[in-house]
Image (cartoon, rainbow, N blue to C red):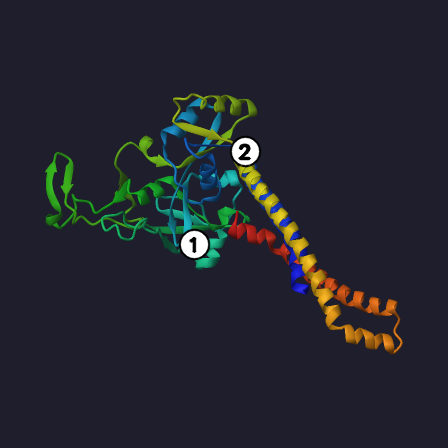
Amino acid sequence: MVTSVTVIIYLPIGLNILVNESEEQLMERASSTPLIVGAKGSSLDLVINTLYFEPADFDELTMLAVDKIYETGFAVPIPMFIKFKARSFPIVGTSIEYIYFRGLEIERGESLAVLGDCIIGSEVSEKLGLNPGDTIISSPENILDIAGIYPLKMNIVGVLKESHSPDDRAIFTDIKTAWVIEGLGHGHENLAKSEDNSVLLGVDGNNYIANAKLFQYNTISAENVDEFHFHGEQAGFPITAVIVIPNSDKDEALLMGRYISKDETSQIVKPDKAIKNLLASIFKIKGLLDSVFSIVAISTILLLGLVVMLSLRLRSREIQTMYRIGSSRFKIAELLVFEIGIIFLMSLVFSAILLTATIRYVTEFIRIFIA
């Protein structure tokens, strides 16, 4: 009976605390991000992927989208390429402007400097025991793809201060490093200096033609960084989204107007609006749960009443004995009410303990499991 009453008291209040805190944390990050540009499709998937680094299935953009925003002069674009992971933590390919935009500070080490460098969040450092000077290897997309891209060993140059945000569990690299992981850039031994003639198929002017035996580097170091290069125009290289920081409200309105055309292949999204739509769905579910809790509460109260009535019938001889030895009917009723009061008092105490723990750890819970 104590457990039943405790659950009935705790669940509606605890759920309300959880939903309110979730709304606050989700809206805080969304509101701090003015605009996001991405391929047309689900705006919610785009926002969740860009803000919280969660995997999502949507089309990619190219760096032309960044150039297009630069040319307007209305805003500062920050390219984002969020596709890969390293030991279950997302690898975020971006520019150094992202670090400044989020107000992230380096606790140990230094900032990104050369290709292959990465900065890790405080949670990544704590859980994996990694520090500046260590390395971390990107995870292959498909371990069964024998002809796939080699995992890249990245050099950890810095650890970020805890920010109580998804940035704590991310690995940040320059976007070019992310392109190397994608396979758009690579480094290999210099064919002109190679002592193994078996890797050379032929020479066409200044171009050397190699076979599959050519060794490709999976680590970028000071010794081989000059051997890494990209094939193709970088303007056509992929990104998943662009975080856009307008210079003013007027520039924001002018920029958004450029994405209204039906022929436009990309979309511009206000993250706070997308998150509000998500929260509206959550509140609908919460309303349904509140109705369920109300029905369960009424059922529990009726059940408790039945248990009390059955208890009184089973204890009828005990009550008669108390009456015969001199207890008044009022005193007997008082004792029975006192017993029921103890049950509700214990339930209130346990509910208070659970609610105190919920309030104490709700922020951490949401940060880990939701936000």
Q: Is residue 329 left or right of residue 200?
A: right
Q: Where is residue 159 in the image (x, y as percent from the top left)?
A: 47, 51
Task: Please state if 204 lies on the left or on the right of 80 as rendered.
Answer: left
Residue 137 percent coordinates (x, y): 35, 53
Q: Tell me the kind of residue under disc 2.
A: Lys
254 on left or right of 263 = right
Reading the image, the residue beneath label 2 is: 273
The residue shown at (52%, 25%) is 252
Give 118 or 361, whichever is nearer the viewer.
361
Which structural element holds mark 2?
helix
**Callout 1, which amino acid?**
Pro
Please give the name of the residue rendered at 49% of the width and 53% of the height, measured from the top-left corner: 122
Q: Residues within 10 Å of mark 2 (few under 14, many from 20)?
A: some
- Secondary structure type for disc 1: loop
Between residue 64 and residue 332, name the one nearer to us.
Answer: 332
C-alpha separation, residue under disc 1 versus residue under disc 2? 38 Å
Say whether disc 1 or disc 2 marks the residue closer to the N-terminus: 1
**Placement of the N terminus among the 4 image quadrants:** bottom right
Q: How crowded is mark 1: few (under 14 residues within 10 Å), some or many (20 or more)?
A: some
Between disc 1 and disc 2, the foreground one is 2
Task: Indicate the position of residue 112 as horizontal and vertical percent values.
Answer: 42, 44
Residue pictured at 60% horizontal, 48% vertical: 289
Rendered image quadrant of residue 358? bottom right
Instruction: Name the residue at 52% across, 35% down.
Output: 274
Q: Can residue 182 be seen in this view?
A: yes
- Tell me the number on the disc at residue 189: none
Q: In which quarter of the image is residue 208?
A: top left
Q: Mark number for residue 132?
A: 1
Query: In this orientation, which residue lies closer to the viewer: 352 or 69?
Result: 352
Q: Which of the pair 254/209 is nearer the observer?
A: 254
Q: Residue 103, image x and y in percent? A: 53, 41
Marks 1 & 2, CB-CB < 8 Å contact: no
